[in-house]
Amino acid sequence: MAAGDEEGSAPEPEQEPAAEEPRSFKDLGVTDVLCEACDQLGWKVPTKIQVEAIPVALQGRDVIGLAETGSGKTGAFALPILQALLETPQRLFALVLTPTRELAFQISEQFEALGSSIGVQSTVIVGGIDTMSQSLALAKKPHVIIATPGRLVDHLENTKGFNLRALKFLVMDEADRILNMDFETEVDKILKVIPRDRKTFLFSATMTKKVQKLQRAALKNPVKCAVSSKYQTVEKLQQYYIFIPSKFKDSYLVYILNELAGNSFMIFCSTCNNTQRTALLLRNLGFTAIPLHGQMSQNKRLGSLNKFKAKARSILLATDVASRGLDIPHVDVVINFDIPTHSKDYIHRVGRTARAGRSGKSITFVTQYDVELFQRIEHLIGKKLPAFPMQEEEVMMLTERVAEAQRIARMELREQGEKKRSRNDDDDTEEAIGVRNKVAGGKKKKRKAF
């Protein structure tokens, strides 16, 4: 992994003994001003991972936190960092690495909410946003940087005067996902340019071989805080499946949305294109649906998320970019419109509902092509799922209207594609003219890579 990582056996992290659960954040050793901030955020009682990790982190130990999605991991690393910052105020104090842009913005919001009374400044460094404005933000030396690995490395290599040589804390959140998204090279580069004398917190839903390797490379004598070591779904989650012919998937989706009207839905699709197509289809049928996927601009992605959070839209269609780490508290029903290829992604998808003690439903669409994938999911979670009760005749009555909406959605999708291509052609033309003018004027400047 990084310098100092050897493939030999590493000492197993200490397992923190389960303590009697404290009644408040104050019992965990959190200082009064931060306890007040927790209270204002509505955090009355610490979660299990916070109970395990916060006291260990406050003792100055490195931490490996294994916990399922929605377990309060951000508080588990943010509170010890903010408390240390109170004791020794310093700029460029902590770096939090995350796999996705949305998760980075969400962590930043929590840092600023918890640290608002003590004047904490955080900056989000992710792709899809102008690098110049990010360079200016970094020049102001914020206390906390929340970043995706790729864009952070870009700034370390290209932004004059920016370095992380004074860093005191490194957090790797959703570490298994960071490594699954092939950010290993970037993480390696970051580990080489930050101080060895630092505190490191590694949080992950799963302990994969890659995460174990990263642990050996980046952590010193860590304490392992595991809330749930086996894959499981929340007890209050009602899980169902429906077995359907592939060609009628859209009709069954419309039927379920009608049957469960009044709820908020998160619908997972396997590709950006299918997410966009299904959103257009549902809009044509009068549903308030909004897409969230990787081909949208950063502003549009955040806009979609905020509209759904504010309940201005009741249906969010998403790729797996949104299945982990996003705090969307009011999802009533999760629909796996396309079954996940990796069984573990099922856990993270359905973890969007039944959060914070509330109940919720998940429904997984299983076509004739998905039987093996579905059996793997049942094996992973250790239970057989019941079929969702359906009225087949009512579904078939919808097919004509759905077919018309499909036709319109395909046309709209084609138009959007043509507009995008046209914009790209215009950009290429402008760029070519710009380059030609520079050459003509004898100004051959090397273009800075984004």
Image (cartoon, helix red, strand yellow):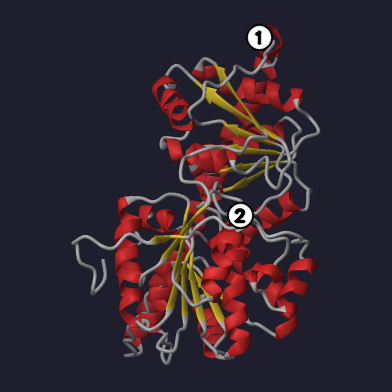
Residue at 57% in and 69% down:
55
Residue at 20% in and 66% down:
6
Q: Which label belongs to residue 383?
A: none
Residue 207: x and y in percent read 39, 51
Q: Amino acid at mark 1?
A: Glu
**Residue 152 horizontal side relative to residue 31, left or right:** left
> Quick check: marks 1 and 2 in contact, CB under 8 Å?
no
**Helix, strand or loop status at disc 1:** helix
Q: Nearer the viewer, mark 1 or mark 2?
A: 2
Q: Which residue in the structure is indicated by mark 1?
A: 392
Residue 123, compared with residue 326, is above or below; it is below
Residue 266: x and y in percent read 64, 40
For the C terminus, the image quarter is bottom left
Q: Amino acid at mark 2?
A: Lys
Q: Which residue in the structure is indicated by mark 2?
A: 48
Which corner quadrant of the image does residue 58 belong to? Answer: bottom right
**Residue 243 horizontal side relative to residue 178, left or right:** right
**Circle nearer the N terminus (1, 2):** 2
Residue 270, compared with residue 35, is above or below; it is above
Residue at 74% in and 68% down:
38
Tell which of 98 and 79 is nearer to you: 79
Q: CA distance from mark 1 to mark 2?
A: 44 Å
**Residue 378 horizontal side relative to residue 83, left or right:** left
Q: How many marks?
A: 2
